[in-house]
Image (tube, rainbow, N blue to C red):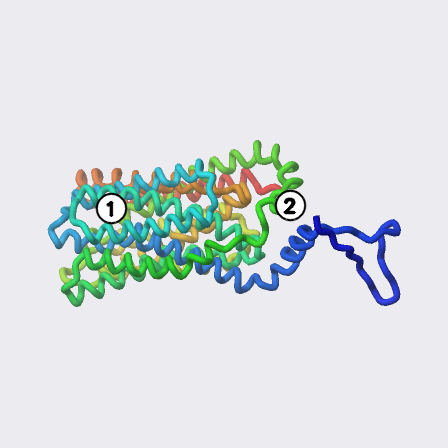
Amino acid sequence: MVKLRWHIEKPGSRYRRSGRRTNIKLSSMTEFATRTFEPHASPHSARRAALACMAALAVALGVGRFAFTPLLPLMLHGGALDIRHGGWLASLNYAGYFLGAIACAALRVDASRMVKTGLALTVLLVLAMGVTDQFWIWAAVRFVAGAVSAWTFVFASQWGLRRLAELGANEWGGVIYTGPGVGIAATGLLVSAASAHGGYGASAGWIGFGLVSAALTALVWRTFASTPTMTAASRDTRNTAQRTRAQSHHAHLHRADAFWLIVLYGVPGFGYIITATFLPVIARAALPAGSPWPDLFWPLLGGALVVGALAGARLPGHWDNRMLLAGCYVLQALGIVSGIASPTAGGFALGSALIGLPFTAITLFAMREARRLHGDDAAGLMGYATAAYGLGQIAGPLVAAPIASHTGSFTPALLLAAGALLAGAVGLVVVALVRRRPRA
C-alpha cells in the first residue's frame, strides 16, 4: 500500500500530531481532492447532466410515447387503422407504462445503464412503427414502448436529480423535465407542417422521428456513460451515520408520506389524460370545419410544458413540494374548465396552456418529494408513484368513453376530471398541514 508523508506548513511553523507526521492513504487523498474541487466543475457538469436528461426524456416520452398523438390522424387517414384500434394502441401503451413503472421498484441496476438501454430500445421501437403496417406488431411495439418510457423516465430522473444534488445545482432540475415538452412541441409542429404540405404519411413520420431520436441518443450517450465523481463506496461511507440516525424515523414517518405521495400523484394522470386523449376530437367538433387550430393545440401544450418546467424549478427550494403540487392540480382543473366554458379557439388555447404549464412541473415536484423521503434510494418510490400516474391514465379513457357515449358529450367526463384534480389538491393541502416536514 502506497502511503504519503503529508504535513501542513505555515510560515514559521510546522504542524505535527504527537510528534509524528500524519499518514494518509493515497485513495483517501484522491477522494478528498475530488470532493473538494468538484464545485469548480459544477456549472458545466450540471448543464451537461441536465441537458442529457432532457434529451433522454424528449426521446423516450416526447417521441417514443407522445408522437403517437399527432401521427394518429395520419394513421387513420392511411386506412391501416380505425378509431377503435387506435384506442387499443393507446391503451396498450398506457398499460405498458404502468407495468414498466411497477417493475422499476424491483429493478436493482445502474441508473445510467438503464437510461442508455431505454434510449436504444426507444429508437428501435419508433423505427419499427414505420416499417410495418400490421396491427398486432404495432400493438406489441406500443406496449413495450410504454414500459421502456417508464423505465427511462424513472432512471433518468434518479440519475439526473442525484447528479445535480452532488454538484449542488438543484436549480437545473427543471431543465430535465422540459424534455417531454420539447418532444411534444417538435413532433406536433413537424406533423402539422407535413400535413399542410401533403405527400407524407405516418410511416415517413415514424421513421423520421426514429432517425432524429437516434441522433439525440448518440449525442448524450457518453454523458450517461461517465462515472460519477463520488464512488458508491465513498457515498455509502458518507451516508452511514445519517442513515443510521434516520432508519427508525423513515420507517414510521416517511412510510405514510410515501403512501400519500403515491396515491395523490395518480390523480393528475386521470385528470389530464381525458383532455389529452380527446382534445382533437372535441376541438374539431366545436370549431368550424377547416380550422387550422385543432392541429396546433397539442404543440401549444408542449410549449407551455417547457415554460412551466423551467418556471417550477425557479421556485424556492424550501417550499413544500406538496403545496406546489396542489397549485399545479388547480391550474390543470382550470384548464379543463376553460374549454368547457368557452368552446372556442381562444378557450381551447387557454386550456391547453393551463394544462401544459404544470404538466411536468408536477413530475418535478413529485420526484423531488420522493428524493426528500428516500434520498439516493428513491427509484422504488419513484416507480410506484409513476405506476399510480399510469394507472390514472389507464382509467381516464375507460371512464370518459362510456360517459361520452351515453350522454353524447364529453362535458360530464371533463367535469369529472376537473373535480378529481381539485379533490387531489385538497388532499395534498391536508396532508401537508397534518404531516409537516421534520426539521433538518
Report the residue at 24% width, 46% height from top.
411
Which of the two discs, 2 and 1, sits closer to the camera? 2
What's the residue type where badge 1 is placed? Thr
Residue carrying label 1 = 411
Task: Using the image, determine if residue 3 lies above or below residue 216.
Answer: above
Task: Using the image, determine if residue 255 lies above or below residue 224.
Answer: above
Residue 352 position, x and y percent, is 31, 56
Q: Nearer the viewer, residue 302 or 407?
A: 302
Report the residue at 46% width, 50% height from top.
112
Measured in 3D between alpha carbons, the distance from the residue under mark 2 to the one under mark 1, in whole angstroms, is 55 Å
Report the residue at 64% width, 55% height from top.
35
**From where the camera sits, is residue 20 visible?**
yes
Decide: few, some or many residues near mark 1? Use Cα within 10 Å; few <14, some 14-19, many ≥20: some
**From where the camera sits, is residue 347 visible?**
no
Query: Which secondary structure, mark 2?
Result: helix
Number of disc labels:
2
Q: Nearer the viewer, residue 359 or 123?
A: 123
Residue carrying label 2 = 238
Residue 404 position, x and y percent, is 20, 42
What's the residue type where badge 2 is placed? Arg
Position of the C terminus, as image quadrant, is top right
Report the residue at 38% width, 59% height from top.
218
The answer to whether residue 409 is left or right of residue 11 is left
